[in-house]
Image (cartoon, rainbow, N blue to C red):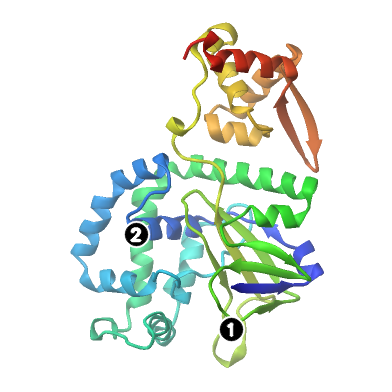
C-alpha cells in the first residue's frame, strides 16, 4: 500500500477545493477508458465518446501521448498538476500549468510511465502543447456546457463532507472519500492500495478535490530544476469522485400521489431527504433556485414534515417521524408511483 505521514498542522490546515482542470482530467480519463460507473456517466459517455475517438483518430501523436500518459495504475506527472485551489479558479489558468511544462520533463514523465521505453513517435518537443490542446477540447466539448451544474454538485459534496468531518472527525471523512484510502492512525493516511514509498507531509498544503466523474488520483508539486519550487509551500492533493450523480434517473422519483398532495417541488425535496442534506446539496440535485428550495423547505418545516439542525457551519434538513411514516406509505404502494 501507499501512505502519507500527515502531521497535525497539515491536516488541520487542509481544505477542500474546486478545480475545472481536475474535472477535465477526470473526463479525459473516463473517455480514454471508455467505461461508465453509473447511468449518468453512461449517458455522458455515450454522448461524447465517438467524438473523442474521432479526434484521436485524426491525431496519432496525441493518441499515443494519451495512451502513454494514462496507464492503469500511474498517470504521467506532468498531466496531473496539483490544482491551484481557491473557490473558482479559471480553467485557462490551471491549464497553463500543463502547457508550460518543459519538453525534457514531459519526456522523462512518459518514459517513467512506460518503464523506460519511449516510442519514436513521442520523441518530440510539442507534447505538452498537444496535451493542453486535447484537454481544452475535452473541456469545451464535454464539460463546459454543464459546468454550472457540475460545480453545484461539487459544492454540495464539499458541504456534506465538511459537515461529516465536523460531526465524526477527519478519520471518518477520509475513510469514506475514495476507494483504498483510510486513516491508519499515527499520522498515517493510506492513499492507495498500490505499493509505493511513503511520503512525509509536513509544512505543506493539503487539498481534497472532488470531481463529478468516477475518477480518483493523487498529485503533488514537483520542484523545478535546481530544487526550487514554483510555490512558496509544497502542495499535495487527493482528487476523488463526489457523491452527487449527473442523471436524474438514478434518483428515486417522488410518488405521483405525494406530488399531487404537496406539489412536485416539495414532494421531490422530501423524497431526496432520505438522508440529511443541506440546501446547497438540494439545489445541486434538483436544479431549483436557492430561494425556491429555501421557501419549500420552510413550508415543509412548518407542516412538521422536516426539521433542521446545525452541523459545524452547515445546516442539515431531515425528515420528521411523521414524514417517514408518509414516505413509507407512499413507497409501500399506498400512494402509487
Identify the disc placed on residue 223: 1
Which quarter of the picture shows residue 156? top right
Which quarter of the picture shows residue 119? bottom left
Compare marks 1 and 2 and give the one earlier in the sequence.
2
- What residue do we see at 51% from left, 64% from top? 94
Question: Tags 1 and 2 in contact by the CB under 8 Å rule?
Answer: no
In the image, taking residue 79 as reference, residue 168 lies left or right, namely right
Against 159, residue 235 (above or below) is below
- For this orientation, the residue located farthest to the front is 332
Q: Nearer the viewer's eye, disc 1 or disc 2?
A: 2
| Secondary structure under the numbered disc 2 in the rendered image | helix
Against 328, residue 153 (above or below) is below
- What residue do we see at 56% from left, 56% from top? 240
Identify the disc placed on residue 33: 2
Quadrant position of the N terminus in the picture: bottom right
In the image, taking residue 38 as reference, residue 62 lies left or right, namely left
Which x, y percent locates residue 170? 75, 56
- For this orientation, the residue located farthest to the top is 261
Q: Nearer the viewer, residue 175 or 139?
A: 175
- What residue do we see at 52% from left, 57% from top? 90
Against 58, residue 298 (above or below) is above
- What residue do we see at 63% from left, 70% from top? 236
Amino acid at each position: 500500500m501507499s501512505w502519507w505521514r500527515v502531521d497535525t498542522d497539515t491536516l488541520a490546515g487542509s481544505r477542500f477545493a474546486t478545480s475545472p482542470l481536475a474535472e477535465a482530467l477526470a473526463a479525459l480519463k473516463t473517455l480514454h477508458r471508455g467505461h461508465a460507473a453509473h447511468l449518468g456517466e453512461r449517458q455522458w459517455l455515450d454522448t461524447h465518446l465517438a467524438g473523442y475517438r474521432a479526434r484521436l483518430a485524426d491525431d496519432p501523436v496525441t493518441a499515443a501521448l494519451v495512451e502513454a500518459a494514462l496507464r492503469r495504475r500511474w498517470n504521467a506527472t506532468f498531466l496531473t498538476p496539483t490544482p491551484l485551489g481557491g473557490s473558482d479558479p479559471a480553467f485557462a489558468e490551471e491549464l497553463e500549468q500543463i502547457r508550460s511544462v518543459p519538453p525534457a520533463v514531459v519526456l522523462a514523465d512518459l518514459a517513467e510511465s512506460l518503464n523506460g521505453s519511449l516510442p519514436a513517435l513521442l520523441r518530440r518537443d510539442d507534447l505538452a502543447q498537444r496535451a493542453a490542446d486535447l484537454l481544452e477540447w475535452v473541456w469545451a466539448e464535454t464539460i463546459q456546457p454543464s459546468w454550472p451544474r457540475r460545480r453545484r454538485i461539487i459544492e454540495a459534496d464539499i458541504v456534506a463532507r465538511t459537515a461529516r468531518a465536523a460531526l465524526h472527525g477527519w478519520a471518518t471523512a477520509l475513510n469514506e472519500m475514495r476507494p483504498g484510502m483510510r486513516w491508519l492512525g499515527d499520522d498515517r493516511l493510506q492513499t492507495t492500495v498500490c505499493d509505493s514509498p511513503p511520503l512525509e507531509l509536513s509544512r505543506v498544503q493539503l487539498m481534497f478535490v472532488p470531481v463529478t466523474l468516477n475518477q480518483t488520483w493523487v498529485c503533488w508539486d514537483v520542484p523545478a530544476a535546481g530544487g526550487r519550487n514554483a510555490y512558496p509551500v509544497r502542495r499535495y492533493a487527493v482528487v476523488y469522485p463526489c457523491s452527487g450523480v449527473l442523471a436524474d434517473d438514478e434518483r428515486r422519483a417522488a410518488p405521483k400521489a405525494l406530488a399531487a398532495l404537496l406539489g412536485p417541488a416539495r414532494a421531490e425535496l422530501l423524497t431526496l431527504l432520505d438522508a440529511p442534506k443541506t440546501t446547497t446539496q438540494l439545489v445541486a440535485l434538483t436544479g431549483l433556485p436557492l430561494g425556491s428550495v429555501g421557501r419549500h423547505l420552510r413550508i415543509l418545516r412548518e407542516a412538521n414534515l422536516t426539521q433542521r439542525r446545525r452541523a459545524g457551519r452547515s445546516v442539515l434538513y431531515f425528515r420528521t417521524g411523521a414524514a417517514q411514516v408518509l414516505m413509507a406509505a407512499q413507497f409501500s404502494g399506498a400512494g402509487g408511483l
